[in-house]
Amino acid sequence: MFFIKKKFLILFIIFFNISGAFAVEKVVFIDIDYLLNNSNFGKIIFKELDKVNKENIKLLEVKEKAIKERKDKINQTKNISSEEKLKKDIKVFNEDVEKFRLEKEKLLTDFKILKEQKLTNFLKKINPIIQNYMENNSIDIVLEKKQIFIGSGDKDITNDIMLLINKG
């Protein structure tokens, strides 16, 4: 009886060890930032964003210069203008400064939204490429490189995906 229990226990342990060996998943990692900065599609996105940002900066600089000139003009006429006219000029100036501040915030918000849309579009474009690569190479999980503390270099598929993105 003891012998049968011992055999059963050994078979039980072997069975669970074998099934555990088949449960190994293939895990790799990818550097999305590198893909964004160095792929052809990512470079196009950054060019477009840079162009919009430069236009916004140029527009804001022109408006800021006009506001500074108005401030200087008010300061120059401060001693010779009537108190009533000075108060009116300062009130109008402050309203213009507030409009400028609101416009600046709106431009920044719009730029941030545009940037998020472009990045989301980039991720939507590369997602099918990564999924196809996963299926072709029997990969179960792809992790972002930023989330990995340390990993083997042969688990990094960034360059393979870069080639696929630039080709397609």
Image (tube, helix red, strand yellow):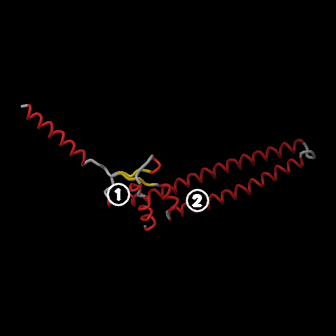
Amino acid on which the number 1 mark rests in the picture: Met
Q: In the displayed structure, does residue 40 sit left or right of residue 66?
A: left
Q: In the displayed structure, does residue 32 sit left or right of residue 140?
A: right
Answer with the quarter of the image where residue 168 lies.
bottom left
Q: Residue furthest bottom?
A: 167
Q: Residue furthest right?
A: 80
- Give the class, few, some or many, for how many residues have Cα within 10 Å of label 1's Cα (few <14, many ≥20): some
Where residue 88 appears, as percent x and y from the top left, is 83, 44
Which residue occupies the foreground of this view, 11 or 129?
Answer: 11
Q: In the displayed structure, does residue 63 sit left or right of residue 162?
A: right
For label 2, the SS is: helix
Answer with the quarter of the image where residue 167 lies.
bottom left
Q: Residue furthest left?
A: 1
Amino acid on which the number 2 mark rests in the picture: Leu
Residue 154 drawn above or below residue 99: below
Q: Residue drawn 56% across and 52% down?
A: 113
Q: Of discs 2 and 1, which sits in the foreground?
A: 1
Would you name the residue on which mark 2 appears?
49
Would you name the residue on which mark 1 appears?
134
Q: Residue drawn 52% across and 55% down?
A: 117
Where residue 70 appears, as percent x and y from the top left, is 82, 51
Where residue 76 appears, as percent x and y from the top left, is 89, 49
Which residue occupies the foreground of this view, 3 or 168?
Answer: 3
Q: How many marks?
A: 2
- Give the class, few, some or many, for how many residues have Cα within 10 Å of label 2's Cα (few <14, many ≥20): some
Q: Residue drawn 61% across and 60% down?
A: 50
Where residue 83 appears, as percent x and y from the top left, is 89, 41
